[in-house]
C-alpha cells in the first residue's frame, strides 16, 4: 500500500514534486512509519522502480514456450509490457522515475538490458527460421526496437488522441514489421498475436505455461 501511494504521487507530480509528507498524507501512514521502512525518499523511489522490474520475468515467461513463431512472441510481449506501462500505476511510476533519474541521488536500475536481451533472442530465432528480413542484425535491431518502443509508451499520453496505446502500438508494428519480416504481412501477424492475447485473457492458465 505504501509503494502504491508513493507510485500514484510520483506519476502525478514526479519525483521532485513529491515529498515524504505527501506520501504520508496519501497513504495514511506517519512519516516515521515511512522512514522505518525506507530511510529516504530516494530509497522509496528505488523500491518503486524495483517493484516494477520484478514483474518482468513473469511477463517474459509467458512468451517463452515453444510452438509460437518468435516475431509473434515479440509482438505479444510488447503488448503485455505496454499494457503494464499504461495501466499499472507502479509500472508507470517506475518509467517516470527512470526518465527523471538525474534528479534522484541514487543509481536507478534500468529494464532495458533485459528487454534488449529478450528482443535479440527472439530476432535471432526468427533469423534461424528464415522469418527475419535479410540484412537485419538481431542485436542492433533489438536496441533500436527497445528505444523506439519505450518512447512510444512514454509519449502516448502527450500525443493527440489521448492514451489509446493499443491503437498506437498496432500502427507502430504495422510500420516496423514491414522491415523486419522476410515476407512482410504485418496485418496477419498482428491478428495472430491479438488472438493469442485474447486467449490468455480468457484462460489465465495459458499465461503460466
Image (cartoon, rainbow, N blue to C red):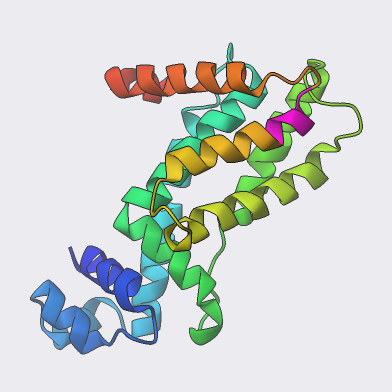
120 left or right, relative to 100: right
* Residue ranking furthest to the right: 135
Residue at point 64% right, 39% down?
118
Q: Can residue 105 be seen in the rendering of this structure?
A: no
26 left or right, relative to 187: left
Displayed quadrant of residue 36: bottom left
| 99 vs 114, nearest the viewer | 99
Please say whether residue 182 is one of the residues in the magenta stretch: no
State whether residue 145 is above or below residue 108: above
| 80 vs 160, nearest the viewer | 160
State whether residue 40 is above or below residue 152: below
Residue at point 39% right, 87% down?
16
Q: Position of residue 58 (x, y in %)?
A: 43, 38
Displayed quadrant of residue 24: bottom left
Quadrant for the C terminus in the image: top left
Q: Position of residue 165 (x, y in %)?
A: 44, 45
State whether residue 102 is above or below residue 55: below
State whether residue 116 is above or below residue 8: above
Q: Position of residue 199 (x, y in %)?
A: 37, 16
Quadrant for the N terminus in the image: bottom left
Residue at point 40% right, 43% down?
83
Q: Which residues are magenta?
A: 176-181
Please say whether residue 180 is one of the residues in the magenta stretch: yes
Q: Position of residue 47 (x, y in %)?
A: 37, 68
Residue at point 56% right, 53% down?
152
Amino acid at each position: 500500500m505504501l509503494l502504491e501511494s508513493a507510485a500514484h504521487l510520483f506519476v502525478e507530480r514526479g519525483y521532485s514534486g513529491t515529498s515524504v509528507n505527501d506520501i504520508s498524507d496519501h497513504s495514511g501512514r506517519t512519516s516515521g512509519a515511512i522512514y522505518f521502512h525506507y530511510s529516504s525518499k530516494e530509497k522509496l523511489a528505488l523500491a518503486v522502480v524495483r517493484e516494477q522490474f520484478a514483474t518482468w520475468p513473469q511477463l517474459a515467461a509467458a512468451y517463452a514456450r515453444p510452438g509460437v513463431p518468435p516475431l509473434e512472441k515479440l509482438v505479444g510481449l510488447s503488448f503485455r509490457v505496454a499494457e503494464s506501462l499504461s495501466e499499472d500505476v507502479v509500472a508507470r511510476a517506475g518509467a517516470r522515475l527512470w526518465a527523471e533519474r538525474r534528479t534522484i541521488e541514487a543509481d536507478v536500475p534500468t529494464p532495458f538490458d533485459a528487454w534488449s536481451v529478450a528482443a535479440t533472442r527472439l530476432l535471432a530465432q526468427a533469423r534461424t527460421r528464415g522469418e527475419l528480413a535479410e540484412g537485419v542484425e538481431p542485436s542492433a535491431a533489438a536496441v533500436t526496437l527497445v528505444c523506439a518502443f519505450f518512447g512510444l509508451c512514454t509519449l502516448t499520453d502527450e500525443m493527440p488522441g489521448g492514451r489509446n496505446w493499443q491503437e498506437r502500438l498496432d500502427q507502430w508494428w504495422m510500420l516496423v514489421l514491414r522491415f523486419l519480416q522476410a515476407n512482410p504481412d504485418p496485418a496477419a501477424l498482428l491478428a495472430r498475436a491479438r488472438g493469442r492475447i485474447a486467449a490468455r485473457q480468457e484462460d489465465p492458465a495459458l499465461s503460466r505455461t
